Image (spheres, grey):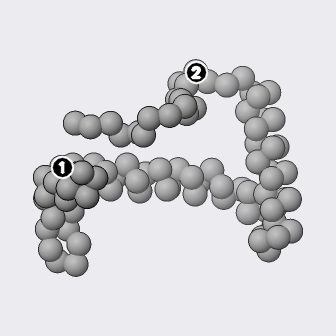
Amino acid sequence: MGRLLPPGPKTCTSTVPLPAGETAVMLVAVGLAYQRQGRYQHFGPGQMIFFPAASLLMLYTMVRSMAVVLWKGGITWRGTFYPLSELRAQRNSRNA
């Protein structure tokens, strides 16, 4: 199985829980970022409440999609099944 992440700098992969103070600081920082961007994108700071739930929902969607593709061995799109082997061969032929 190939790499799931592209090469590059490490992302935040720590499993060590953050102290409550650091977590609070990060939540305040996200809130301030939402408030600042809300001026330009027309949403309120109250929408920050839904950010953690939306992030978890997006993560679940991506992980489930990956698991289904690996379990089935390919992708079904518009009623046609495309095996991973063919998709990888097509990708490799374009990069050659």
Which residue is denoted by mark 2 in the rendering?
A: 16
Q: Residues within 10 Å of mark 2 (few under 14, many from 20)?
A: few
For marks 2 and 1 on the same chain, the one whose residue lies earlier in the sequence: 2
Residue 68 visible in the current orientation: no
Residue 73 vertical position relative to residue 11 in the rendered view, above or below: below
Q: Amino acid at mark 2?
A: Val
Position of residue 52 in the picture relative to residue 81 (left or right)? right
Say which residue appears at 86% left-offset and 59% top-offset. Answer: 36
| Local SS, label 2 | loop
Three-letter code, disc 1: Trp
Q: Nearer the viewer, residue 10 or 62?
A: 10
- Up the image or down, 86 lies above or below 24; here it is below
From the top left corner, tell me how far across and down residue 63 is, in percent.
Answer: 37, 49
Which quadrant of the view contains residue 51? Answer: bottom right
User: x, y (%) of residue 73?
Assistant: 15, 53
Q: Is residue 50 left or right of residue 61?
A: right
Disc 1 target residue: 71
